Amino acid sequence: MIRTRRLRLTPFLRDLTSEYRVTVNDLVMPFFVVEGQKKKEAIPSLPGIYRYSPDKLVEEVEKIHLEKGIKAIILFEVSRNKDKTATASRQENGVIPRVISLLKKKFPHLVIITDICLCTYTSHGHCSILTEEPKQRKKKNLPDTVATDNDATIEVLAKMALSHAKAGADFVAPSAMMDGQVGAIRKRLDTHGLTYTGILAYSAKYASHFYGPFREAMQSAPGHGNRKSYQMDFRNSREAIREIQADIQEGADIVMVKPALAYLDIIQRVKSSISQPVAAYNVSGEYSLVHHYKNGDREVLIYEIATAIKRAGADLIITYHAAELADILNATYQNLQEKRE
Ligand code: PBG
């Protein structure tokens, strides 16, 4: 008989022989930012997560960064200023550049990542500029697809990224799934001497139904059609490698798989194909599922999920559970041990 249980007999033995460990170093906390002052708006489908005005955001970041030890955040603007060409996306005095300067002054070591996408700024809710409205296409009897102006969009994304980088963002994270977006951004940043601003590319971003709560938070659901002509088809796995390789060629420093929990196989596949760091985005719908889970200890469930994402191969994890997870991971040895019994 092979007695594999010998190594599992006591908590110390299990710790000693454990293979993967999530740490606070791996976590990135997402934040939603709105214009204004003293705002803390609840998001019904994301309980515990809020939209903050810049002043309130600084207070929140202080808690998770200085008190809990989280080293990185990713910022999303919730814009109420929407038009067809996403004008509000690239203003150098916009809310995101202002927030970056505020945060950098107070927390110089904090790693600030910003999401680069147009969906919160476009009146139609798509991640790109469109060449024509669906009604026009229908009239002309053209196939039913979203008429994305890919090449015009990547120039706008590059301008948006530049405005964040100039304000001091450490990483910009293009998430619009436009071809060539990473290359266009890298070129623009380099031209302006921002050679050390990194790119965290949302490379393998699937057209997923797990983004529902985020779209409510951002008020960014597409008004017509869906995102399937630019985000990936969840029936595909090899295609993720193609996306990742293209982004690496164009200059991505870190690549991302999104969502995470339902896509652990993709994380593992990507990890074994490249040597760049791999990020995973444990998205809003995954958070919401866990929130509604009633039959167990939620803290241990969160810990188990984060460990699974790590075990699959993620080096960093973007998660709405980051603050809670930091508490779980920072708990004294005894407390944590009791939880895991
Ligand atoms: C922007 C963007 C989305 C998410 C991150 N960046 C939504 C989408 O593509 O519709 C989703 C994040 C989440 O669900 O937590 N395009």
Image (cartoon, grey):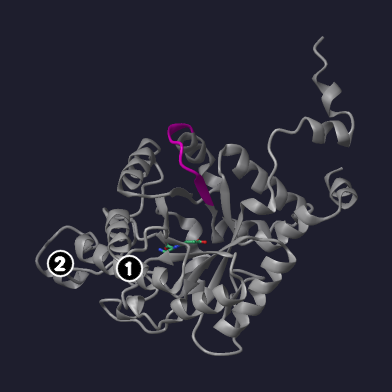
Q: Nearer the viewer, residue 79 or 17?
A: 17
Q: Amino acid at mark 2?
A: Arg
Front disc: 2 or 1: 1
Direction front: furthest residue: 193
Would you name the residue on which mark 1 appears?
Answer: 126
Let me know if residue 273 is in the magenta part.
Answer: yes
Direction left: furthest residue: 140
Q: Quadrant of residue 9?
A: top right
Residue range (magenta): 272-280
Horizontal placement of 119 versus 327: left or right? left
| Image quarter of the C terminus | top right
| Image quarter of the N terminus | top right
Q: Residues within 10 Å of mark 2 (few under 14, many from 20)?
A: some
Q: Residue at x 71, y 71 (%)?
A: 63
Q: Nearer the viewer, residue 139 or 13?
A: 13
Horizontal placement of 295 versus 227: left or right? right
